[in-house]
Amino acid sequence: MLCKKTTARALFALYMSAVMMLSACGTQPPVSADGEVQEKVIAVLGWDEYVEGNQDFIDGMEMALKEWNTRVPIRVEYYNDEGNYDKGLLMAQELTKKSNVAAVFSFQDFEVIDAEAPYFEEAEKPLVAIQGCYEKTLERGLKFVFSSYVSSKDMGAAAAKYCANKGIQRVACCHTDTTFEEDEIKGFCSEAQAQGMTVTDLQVGLDSSNSLERAYQRWKTLGAQALYLCKYTETESEKDWIFRTIQYIKERDPDFLVLGDYSLNGPEYLEKYGKDMEGTAYPRPYSVMEGEKSKEFQDKYAELYPDMLPVGDGAYQGYDMTQMVETALQNKGEKADGVAIRDFFKAEGGYDGVSGSLSYSEEGKIRSTIEYYCVHGGTFVMEEAYE
């Protein structure tokens, strides 16, 4: 197991060496008439430092590759765009021209994914946004773009369903004026209306103690019982402010429900503020249905990567996404292409993975029964899922 502090460059070099060795083992790969090996590639595209930060996903991919022994050999190639918009687009265009690239797993910024999506559509190569993309990207009618995380509108709708199941009737919302967060609010408000709830206040910003105090007094006056808080953060101080906001509210009314999104994923902040966040919840971006398969996967992962426990959602995701690509290719053999992968991902029957039944809607959204993380006793635990 590589140390978490291993540099991205060293990590990729060592890992790619291992993957290429795996590709060379087992069943002999099919050979074309001119003797060329018909090998398939899953390209991982994104800033290497960011990809390294998602080590559990890479571990899951590695596990899937180790278990793959078939007539269709597959390996992984990494493409580092250094977090640069223009370089990311150029790399995307180059990948669409590579005949052996079966699918692309992107860890890129949502703006880049939105701009490059048409390239993959024209080339009929599946582009999987591993940590999501803009709603507008999914609403463009593209057939080869997939969001492997719960979409922004679905995230907001899930938060509203959680409120409804907790008996909340009046709720306030606070968000940043950023695309993803605005779409979360749209999803929340639409579902809140469907559930018969009243959204009493929509607040943009809320970045100072004075503004927070005024907003809180307004919410109480309006009879709000809950707050949906979804704010984009770039700095540690911005992230810290989200948790301080929750602390402020909970100190004044422990029964006031606060819901958030992925921005609440921060163990170091939870350790600092968790004791003051009882009941705070957020929809799980990638849900894992517990069962025999997930338990077996957990045991295998623990044996291979004891330093990475507990098993993160990314490990399940990396394993299942890779297995889905592999299975789609295997089903079509030498005739496998991007269309085969697209059709397999969107099959209504779904794929029975270690994280549950997986499939994607026609617009590329992952079909999922959403679970929830909820703070109890200072730590996040899983709560029930609502259809």
Image: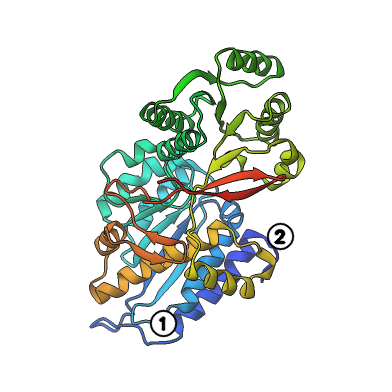
The residue sitting at 61% across, 35% down in the picture is 234
Q: Amino acid at mark 1?
A: Asn
Callout 1: 10 Å neighbours few (<14), some, many (20+)?
some
Q: Quadrant of residue 346?
A: bottom left
Secondary structure of the residue carrying numbered label 1: loop
Residue holding disc 2 = 5
Looking at the rendered structure, the number of numbered marks drawn on it comes to: 2
Q: As drawn, which residue projects farthest toward the front? A: 167
The residue sitting at 61% across, 20% down in the picture is 206
Q: Amino acid at mark 2?
A: Lys
Residue holding disc 1 = 69
The percent position of residue 311, horizontal first and vertical second, equals: 60, 62
Secondary structure of the residue carrying numbered label 2: loop
The percent position of residue 153, horizontal first and vertical second, equals: 40, 36
Which scheme is used to colour this image of the protein?
Answer: rainbow
101, 251: nearer the viewer: 251
Disc 2 from disc 1: Cα separation: 31 Å
The percent position of residue 122, horizontal first and vertical second, equals: 25, 50
Q: With respect to residue 215, does 124 lie above or below?
A: below
Q: Earlier in the sequence, mark 2 or mark 1?
A: 2
Callout 2: 10 Å neighbours few (<14), some, many (20+)?
few
Q: Which of labels 2 and 1 is toward the front?
A: 1
